[in-house]
Amino acid sequence: MAGFAAVVLAGGSARRMGGSDKPSLVVAGRSLRDRVLDAVAAADPTVVVGGRTDVPPGVRYTREDPPGGGPVAAVAAGLAAVGPEPQVVALVAGDLPMLTTAAVTGLGHALSTADGALFVDADGRRQLLCGVWRPDSLRRRLTALASAGHGASMRALIEPLRVVEVSWAGDGPPPWFDCDTEEDLRMVREWLTAKRAG
């Protein structure tokens, strides 16, 4: 997928992991955040929202307003930092160690003329922080929610939009697998170790 931007949401409190900076946790020699940045390396620009400020060269950093304001505030900050030029933006969480370039490219190919493309799991649940979007569509929704005084969730943000739902048929943990617990981290470490050994 060519000509796209990326917004990586790397904030949050990680309450189930003792309040740690979750995207900084390391699996197979790379932090979760840096693994996500690897998957969107072709994006221009790439913006990290929240979390550690020591981003790699060429990556922009910003904070949501207010800090800790949740994913919708982070989306707004990320889109502002991306600027008006990109026609497509990958919007992903910063704790997805199994995200790959191929997965992001697949979402981009599925987008077509829709507002967004999201992975869905085997039960049909949309993976709200693993998708590709038309940024203008997201900006219109952000404006509508702000004018309504809505304390918005990601679900409320995207609910009226035209979304292509993309299934995943690969082996192992899917691209949207996030590390919310120590058990999640252990599983990913074991899977990546086995993959490298094989």
Image (cartoon, rainbow, N blue to C red):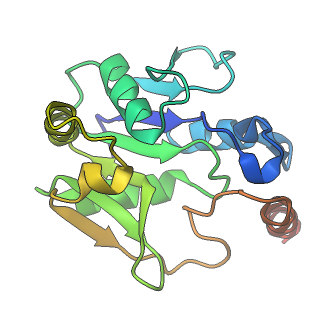
4 on left or right of 24: left
The residue drawn where x is 69% and y is 22% is 52
Residue 177: % across, % down: 62, 63
The image quarter containing residue 86 is top left
The image quarter containing residue 57 is top right
Residue 13: % across, % down: 67, 39
The image quarter containing residue 55 is top right
The residue drawn where x is 32% and y is 39% is 89
Q: Nearer the viewer, residue 151 or 93?
A: 151
Q: Nearer the viewer, residue 144 or 135?
A: 144
Identify whether 192 is placed above or below 156: below
Residue 154: % across, % down: 37, 50
Query: In this view of the protein, can residue 41 be seen by the observer?
Result: no
Residue furthest to the front in view is 149
198 on left or right of 173: right
108 on left or right of 192: left
The residue drawn where x is 73% and y is 47% is 15
Quadrant housing the C terminus: bottom right
Query: In this view of the protein, can residue 198 be seen by the observer?
Result: yes
Residue 114: % across, % down: 14, 57
The residue drawn where x is 20% and y is 43% is 134
Residue furthest to the bottom in view is 123
Count of numbered marks: 0
121 on left or right of 37: left
